[in-house]
Amino acid sequence: MIELKNVSKTFTLHNQSSAVIEVINDVSFSVAAGECVALTGASGAGKSTLMRMIYGNYLTQAGSICIGDVNVVQAEPREVIALRREVLGYVSQFLRVVPRVPTLDVVADPLRALGVPSDDAQARAQDLLTQLNIPQRLWSLSPTTFSGGEQQRVNIARGFAHAYPAMLLDEPTASLDATNREVVLSLIEEAKARGCAIIGIFHDESARDRVCNREIDVSAFTPGAAA
Ligand SMILES: Nc1ncnc2c1ncn2[C@@H]1O[C@H](COP(=O)(O)OP(=O)(O)OP(=O)(O)O)[C@@H](O)[C@H]1O
């Protein structure tokens, strides 16, 4: 479902004498439907950079990154937008929302964008918010004033609303209490069971051991670090 072939990345710092930093050199791996793969490696190894490349936020200088039949490296912006709407979900650590949109709509909107009837989208959003212990009195409010943990849970609810065939998870259990961490791990297990291919960064080792089928140590592809 997700296939990286000979992927490399450099950053050029235009404001610092055009210094070129090589971050990732020649990564190849694939993730099958129903599999969860953890990206590991020391801080600065390039885990987040690789996730952003897969999501199409960062340019990739060499190689191919295929999600289904779309190569993100060469895709047109409109193809990347369609891919993100239908195929590739991304749960980052932080919620980014339009101000004044109620929490229920924040969670239901990805489904409505896919043409799911509004009532069904709302029912799914209510179910996820209930599972993630967001009190009903907060559903009609914008999450912009919510606590950090509440915002993270709204973000997870939104990320899991649609049954994406592939997902990227950046520290999905960070700063959650034990009860909500358990809910998130169950959502990941459910996604795997329905065939979702997942790549995640998990600093929480026991979470990683529980949901991930294997690990890829990104430091092995960091120029200079492997020596
Ligand atoms: N936009 C950028 N411009 C220049 N260099 C960058 C940029 N983003 C990341 N880097 C560099 O790429 C390297 C990898 O960073 P990255 O954030 O991917 O590491 P990481 O493995 O996710 O680290 P952590 O576990 O600390 O989050 C670092 O040396 C970082 O300074």
Image (tube, rainbow, N blue to C red):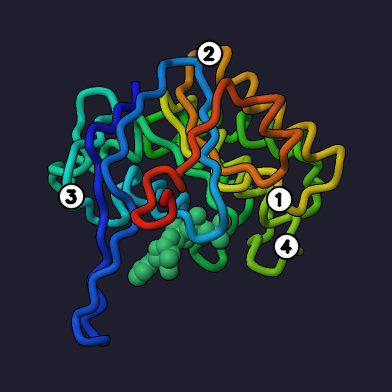
Q: Along the polypeptide, which appears first: circle 2 or circle 3?
A: 3
Q: Is residue 104 above or below residue 96?
A: above
Across and down, in percent, residue 35 comes to 50, 19
Spatial CA span between label 2 and label 4: 30 Å
Q: Which residue is mark 3?
A: 77
Residue 135, image x and y in percent? 82, 47
Res 100 label: none
Is disc 4 in contact with disc 1, using a CB cutoff of under 8 Å? no
Q: Sequence-wise, which precedes: disc 4 or disc 1?
A: 4
Q: Residue at x 35, y 38 (%)?
A: 85
Measured Cα–Cα span from mark 3 to mark 4: 32 Å
Say whether residue 212 is visible.
yes
The image quadrant where one finds ligand 1 is bottom left
Q: Give me the disc on residue 194.
A: 2
Name, please, the residue furthest toward the front.
227
Q: Give the quadrant of residue 81.
A: top left
Q: Is residue 95 visible?
A: no
For the residue labelled by badge 2, is the local secondary structure a helix, a strand or a loop?
Answer: loop
Residue highlighted by disc 1: 174
Residue 148 - label:
4
Contact between labelled residues 1 and 3, with CB atoms less than 8 Å apart: no
* Residue in front for this viewpoint, 152 or 34: 34
Q: Residues within 10 Å of mark 4 (few under 14, many from 20)?
A: some
Q: Percent position (x, y) of residue 215?
A: 54, 31
Q: Residue type at mark 2? A: Arg
Quadrant containing the N terminus is: top left
- Whether tag 3 and tag 4 are in contact, CB under 8 A, the answer is no
Is disc 1 placed on a helix, strand or loop?
loop
